[in-house]
Amino acid sequence: MRQVSAAVTCGDIALGRYGPVEMPTPWWNDVAPVAEWLSGLLGVPVMVLRLVDVEGGRSMRDGHVTYHAEALELPPQAPITLLNSSAPPAEHLLAAHEPLRASWATVEGLRAALDWALNITGPSEIRQVKTWNLAGLFHLPGENAWLKTTPPFASPESSVIQALAEVDPTLVPQVLAAEPERGWMLLGHIPGEDCWKAGPDLVADTVRRFTLAQQSLRDLIPARTEAAHSRQRLGVPGLVDRRRILAAAQHLSPVPGSDELFSQVPALEEELAACGLPYTLVHGDFHPGNWRAVPGGPAVVLDFADAHFGHPAADGLRLQEWVGNAEAWVGAWSIPGADPRRALEVAAPLAALGQAVRYQEFLDGIEPSERRYHLGDPEEALENAVRAFRRLRPA
């Protein structure tokens, strides 16, 4: 399980270090119970800014985790209990500047994002749910809205959602407000629960609806050559083009077999294009854990931070990882002139290579103390790509 300590500040004031205490959940980025504990201890709203250190633990969970937290108000009096008071104070956190720190992991950035949301919703309690290097998530129950903050290397998520909403507004959450250049987005609440245990009927329906939206967006492009030269692909400004992955992949640390794979990437991309499926908007992390639904109702698709312009087989392969097969995806993409089953086979090494590139982008874009979330991920994904290539092209 996870033990937690926290160095707490309020603006320029260091309030002290508290803990360790045991949390009910193991995940490092699940900071809701941490914020609740500190808020109760200090008697004012407190939110976690960032992870500082972890002793023990692995795979984003367990161990003794130390956070930097910010009290949104100065406590009316010193806390009755100051645990672990012999530990070094938090003054060093106040002066420490890290250029890759997420905006919501700074005192100024967190307060600015919260003020922006409250200016839109009006007065509301704010409950912090998650925070880490890829996103911050906050619930505003007064308006039943959700604030999400994302880093510069995330996709323009609000623009992606709005593009899909023009095709099928039931497929995505409602964007109440957004400032894409600052990575801020305010979403309407989605009733129901996450679909981790989605049954085959829900999987088939969600895949069908999402595929229809992808096909509709693709049909908006007059010609493939035009899309290649436009930064506003599919009506989404700044959507990254990942149809060609080799240049980015060559910055990865090599693993056994990766040189051979790299030499074959252009041929694989040509073979994939010949499978007849159009390039379009790709979710990037398409699995039931990123869907939400009420029992018996259609799913709403969430979390487009990895969305890009590319081959839809990447979504089919991600789905297959989670549900054990991609039959629903194959059925949805069985359109004239297309061979979706072969596309999955050919795309497997390319999609894993794309994951390796994406994980390296995470590591390159986040501050050192948070890199423990993703260390080793690029190498593991690249090894998966080599294995997939060898299955496709056995010696």
Image: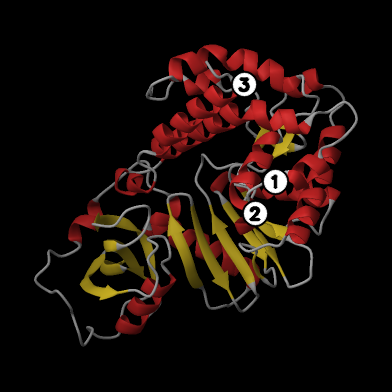
> Of label 2 and label 3, which has the lower sequence position?
2
**Residue with the mark numbered 2:** 178
Mark 1 residue crowding within 10 angstroms, few (<14) / some (14–19) / many (20+): many
**Residue with the mark numbered 3:** 244
**Residue with the mark numbered 1:** 159
Amino acid type of the residue tagged 2 in the rendering: Ala
Mark 2 secondary-structure assignment: strand
Q: Give the label on residue 223, or none.
A: none
Q: Where in the figure is residue 359, as x and y percent of width and height?
A: 46, 37
Discs 2/3, front:
3
Q: Where in the figure is residue 113, as x and y percent of width and height?
A: 51, 60
Amino acid type of the residue tagged 1 in the rendering: Ser
Residue at horizontal 52 percent and vertical 50 percent from the top? 150
Discs 1/3, front:
3
Q: Indicate the quadrant containing the N terminus: top left, top right, bottom left or bottom right.
A: bottom left
Mark 3 secondary-structure assignment: loop
The reply to whether the C-beta atoms of the residues labelled 2 and 1 are less than 8 Å apart is yes
Residue at horizontal 14 percent and vertical 74 percent from the top? 84
Residue 82 falls in image quadrant:
bottom left
Q: Tell me, yes or no, if residue 72 can be seen here.
A: no
Determine the CA span between mark 2 and mark 3.
30 Å
The reply to whether the C-beta atoms of the residues labelled 2 and 3 are less than 8 Å apart is no
